[in-house]
Every structure is written in C-alpha cells, then in structure tokens.
Image: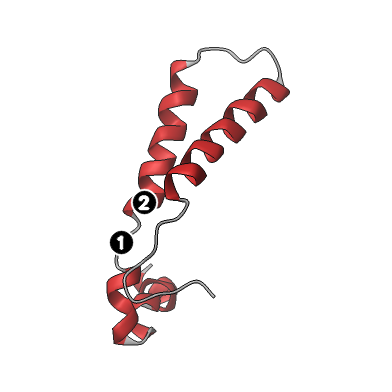
Amino acid sequence: MLKKDWKHMTTYLRTPSHHWRFTQTTNHLERAFLEFRRKFNNITMMPNAQSAERLAYAQVDIVCKRWQGRQLNGWSVQ
C-alpha cells in the first residue's frame, strides 16, 4: 500500500513550505463532518429523502455562517 499510494500520501510535502502552516490540519472540516454525523445519528428515521436534504442543507448553512468573514493569516480575499 505504501508503494501504491506514496504519491498521494506525500502530496503535502510537495507543496511550498510557506504554505504548510495553512494546510497541515483538516480540523475545521473534521469538526463540520462530526457535527453532520452527530445530527444524523441522533435522528433514527427520516420520513423521506427531502427531510434528509433539508437537514444537510441546514447544517451546511450553519457551518458557512460560522466561517463567514474569517480570514487565514497571510491570505487576503481580493
């Protein structure tokens, strides 16, 4: 597996070193997915697919509003 997936496993190391501090963690995404799982796991049954879609949309909306206006150090929005 290491030989087969080496290129994908070392992608991080091929990025310029000055970008490493911005890409070294996925905690924000992991936290968002943890919230999705927590919400969906607490609901034992969805009446239909549209209900699941509404819940997923609501969770994405909450995360987007929480992240809105935040800026990474050293990056600017232009």
Residue tagged by mark 2? 28
Q: Which residue is mark 1?
A: 25
Find residue 30 and report its horizontal and vertical position in percent: 37, 47
Closer to us: 26 or 3:
26
Residue 25 as seen in the image, left or right of residue 77: left
Quadrant housing residue 6:
bottom left
* Amino acid carrying mark 1 in the image: Thr
Residue 55, x across and y down, in percent: 58, 26
- Number of labels in the image equals 2
Give the secondary structure at mark 1. Answer: loop
Q: CA distance from mark 2 to mark 1?
A: 8 Å
Which residue corresponds to the image point at 65% horizontal and 27% vertical from the top-left? 54
In front of the other: 78 or 1: 78
Is 9 placed left or right of 45 in the picture?
Answer: left
**The C terminus appears in which quarter of the rendering?**
bottom right
Image position of 54 with respect to 30: above or below: above
As helix, strand or loop, the secondary structure at mark 2 comes to helix
